[in-house]
Image: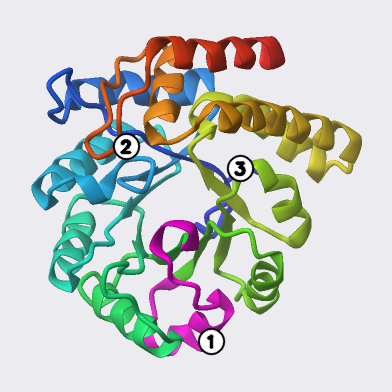
Amino acid sequence: MAPAADGKVTGLLAATFTPFTAQGEVNLSVIGPYVDYLTEKQGIKGIFVNGTTGESMSLSVAERKLLAEEWCQRAKGRMDNVIVHAGCMSLKDSQDLARHAADIGADGIAVISPSFFKPRTAESLRKFLQEVASAAPTLPFYYYQIPSLTGVNVPVRDVIEDIEELIPSFRGVKFSGSDLLDFGQCVSYSQPRWSVLYGVDEQLLAGLAMGANGAVGSTYNYIGRYVNQLISAFETGDLVRARTIQFKIQELLGYAIKLGFDIGVNKQLMAKVSGLFLGPPRLPVMPCSPAHAQLIAQKYHSIFV
């Protein structure tokens, strides 16, 4: 997918990992080489910063600001889109991060639902999103849905009903659930300047067939170049080629899931493939053993190299 002339987000966005030192502190020095790797080796032109993959809920607000600023600075002129996730358990913290994202020149903000005190209805979730968006009213705003982690199962189609009346800056959804009924209804309702971005990497082809404008995912950090080939094959009608690549992705992830696959393992796999030192995950996520990561890396190389 080529960049849209109207600024609409399309194509792949890598959900970035947060680099830590061996002692568990944020390591900003890795971000420059990380951007180099994504652009030069994976053909990635968009990033989604401080999301689930970036362990945002384990970071302080101050750390998230430092990271967002460094990502925006390093990606400037090299990435088409830097979307900063600003969602927090606290409305005030979310608003603070939204304002900061606008100040540092982010291309958009995404906000996840609070998941401790959960919104029980679309109305309460919409009000929360509205209050966050109001802190950065000129910045494109995306609702980030991931029910497997938030436990919030409010249909996205209900959330986006007439949403621009509440949030004029609303520009789409990062849909990270597997409910293709809800996803399809979102695509069907989507307005011309919105982007509906699919977030389940192992089902991307299904998302594209349903009308996804693009995708956000953690695996695009290290298989982005192959997923770009999948998208190109889909767009040219070569479904056999597109399915072949999707099945390879499923083979890798199916193998990883059987061994045990979480943020810590995924982060270590990225480090193995890219050569970047990303450090350990932050507790309560446990580090991945080198042997565990090596098995998955070997599977990766047997499939894709």
Kind of residue sitting beneath label 1: Glu
Disc 3 to disc 1, how far (Cα)?
A: 26 Å
Give the residue at mark 1: 161
Is residue 74 one of those drawn in magenta?
no
Q: Earlier in the sequence, mark 3 or mark 1?
A: 1
Is residue 169 one of those drawn in magenta?
yes
Residue 92 to residue 29: above or below: below
Q: How is the image coloured?
A: rainbow
Disc 2 to disc 3, how far (Cα)?
A: 26 Å
Kind of residue sitting beneath label 2: Lys
Residues drawn in magenta? 147-170
Q: Please, what secondary structure does the residue beneath circle 3 have?
A: helix
Q: Please, what secondary structure does the residue beneath circle 1 have?
A: loop
Please indicate whether residue 181 sits to the left or right of residue 214 in the image: right
Give the residue at mark 2: 76
Q: Residue furthest left?
A: 62
Q: Earlier in the sequence, mark 2 or mark 1?
A: 2
Residue 138: name its quadrant.
bottom left
Residue 48 location (% of width, % of height): 40, 46
